[in-house]
Image (cartoon, rainbow, N blue to C red):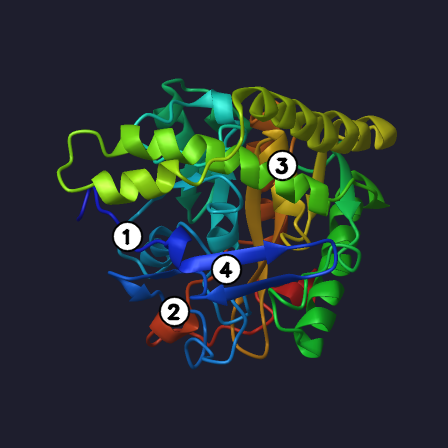
């Protein structure tokens, strides 16, 4: 068994993403692609990558911790560790039907990780079950803590569900597919009903402040300010890096004073006026919703812990279907408790059908959705 390995990742500089309030679009290569490793393929996707797909389309494994997610879901390793600044753990985990946790940024040391954004950089496990995630968190944080939240039920848990239609993917990022959209909405609604019947106190269609174009401008400025010196520290002692270190340093045009003000504003907008307001307004413990519509950007820029939970597989191409769960700041433990209740109620994830031999056919609905 390989104990330590480096898997394929999305190369940031091969992908230029342009955001605005109405759409996502990109030029260059798509998520999960690098010059050295090529395009990462998901074992779930029947027929492989669609060459006409959008940069984060339904046949794409997402990124940027793409190779880790795919290597794990293909059975090459028992667990994987990812890094995230804006969806890099949770998006590929969602596309690989994994239970993952992106920790609060200040919960764990980031030493040895290439810095990108000081507000949101963090680490976390990518695993096949909530138990594995809890065990790995115990190891990462050096405390026998997270396993105590295993075996939890939904009874009494106060959950706010985001409207999957209001937070639907932008067509420039994910090519629309009517069958998938209808299946997701049907399964999402059925899951809410079953969770409510299990004793949870749920609020449907909670509101949450979205990322704006002004936010994106500040986010890029923060990242460009952090990335240059961070890259130089990351490559210190490595020969032949001067050219790319200089290029990374030249990305920044933001003064230290502007940087501090942008960080303050982003924390205020995504945290205080965003997630904090939603938690307080609806008196909820966690928020559950789709990983689309830039919701993950809100969670990451605010620095809040987030996890992923699978609950189905697309009929049209086999891609996993999942949700994100986010907890209040510095409260990583409700993530494990919610994931454990979810897995116990909705059933375990299923391996890629194309890798299963001699086993019962895996149905596209996944996780026994017909029983939800």
- Vertical placement of 119 versus 67: above or below? above
Indicate which disc residue 7 carries.
Answer: 1
Indicate which disc residue 95 carries.
Answer: 4
Q: CA distance from mark 4 to mark 1?
A: 16 Å
Q: Secondary structure at mark 2?
A: loop
Q: Nearer the viewer, mark 4 or mark 1?
A: 1
Indicate which disc residue 218 carries.
Answer: 3
Residue 253 horizontal/vertical position (percent): 50, 35
Residue found 76% across the figure and 51% down from its top: 192
* Pointer 3 or 2: first along the chain: 2
How many neighbours does mark 3 have within 10 angstroms: few (below 14), some (14-19), or many (20 or more)?
Answer: some
Q: CA distance from mark 2 to mark 4?
A: 10 Å
* Pointer 1 or 2: first along the chain: 1
How many neighbours does mark 1 have within 10 angstroms: few (below 14), some (14-19), or many (20 or more)?
Answer: some
Q: Is residue 227 left or right of residue 274?
A: left
Q: Is residue 4 left or right of residue 22?
A: left
Residue 99 horizontal/vertical position (percent): 49, 46
Q: CA distance from mark 3 to mark 4?
A: 28 Å
Which residue position is annotated with label 2? Answer: 43
* Pointer 3 or 1: first along the chain: 1
């Amino acid at each position: 068994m390989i104990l330590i390995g480096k898997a394929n990742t999305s190369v940031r500089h091969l992908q230029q993403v342009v955001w605005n309030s109405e759409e996502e679009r990109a030029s260059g290569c798509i998520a999960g692609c690098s010059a050295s490793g090529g395009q990462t393929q998901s074992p779930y996707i029947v027929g492989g990558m669609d060459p006409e797909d959008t940069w984060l389309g339904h046949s794409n494994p997402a990124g940027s911790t793409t190779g880790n997610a795919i290597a794990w879901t293909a059975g090459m390793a028992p667990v994987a560790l990812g890094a995230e600044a804006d969806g890099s753990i949770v998006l590929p985990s969602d596309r690989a039907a994994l239970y993952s946790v992106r920790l609060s940024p200040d919960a764990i040391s980031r030493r040895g990780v290439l810095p990108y954004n000081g507000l949101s950089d963090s680490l976390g496990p990518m695993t096949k079950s909530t138990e594995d995630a809890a065990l790995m968190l115990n190891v990462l944080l050096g405390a026998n803590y997270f396993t105590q939240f295993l075996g939890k039920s939904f009874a009494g848990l106060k959950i706010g569900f985001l409207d999957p239609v209001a937070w639907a993917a932008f067509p420039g990022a994910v090519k629309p597919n009517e069958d998938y959209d209808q299946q997701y909405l049907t399964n999402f609604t059925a899951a809410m009903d079953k969770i409510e019947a299990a004793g949870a106190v749920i609020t449907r269609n909670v509101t949450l402040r979205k990322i704006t174009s002004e936010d994106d401008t500040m986010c890029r400025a923060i990242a460009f300010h952090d990335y240059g010196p961070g890259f130089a520290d990351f490559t210190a002692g490595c020969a032949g890096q001067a050219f790319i270190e200089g290029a990374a340093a030249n990305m920044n045009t933001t003064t230290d004073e502007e940087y501090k003000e942008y960080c303050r504003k982003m924390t205020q907008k995504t945290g205080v006026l965003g997630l904090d307001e939603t938690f307080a307004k609806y008196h909820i413990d966690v928020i559950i919703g789709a990983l689309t519509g830039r919701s993950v950007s809100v969670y990451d820029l605010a620095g809040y812990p987030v996890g992923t939970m699978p609950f189905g597989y697309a009929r049209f191409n086999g891609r996993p279907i999942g949700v994100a769960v986010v907890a209040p700041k510095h409260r990583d433990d409700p993530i494990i408790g919610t994931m454990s209740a979810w897995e116990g109620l909705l059933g375990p994830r299923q391996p890629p059908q194309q890798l299963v031999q001699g086993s019962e056919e895996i149905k596209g609905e996944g996780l026994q959705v017909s029983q939800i």
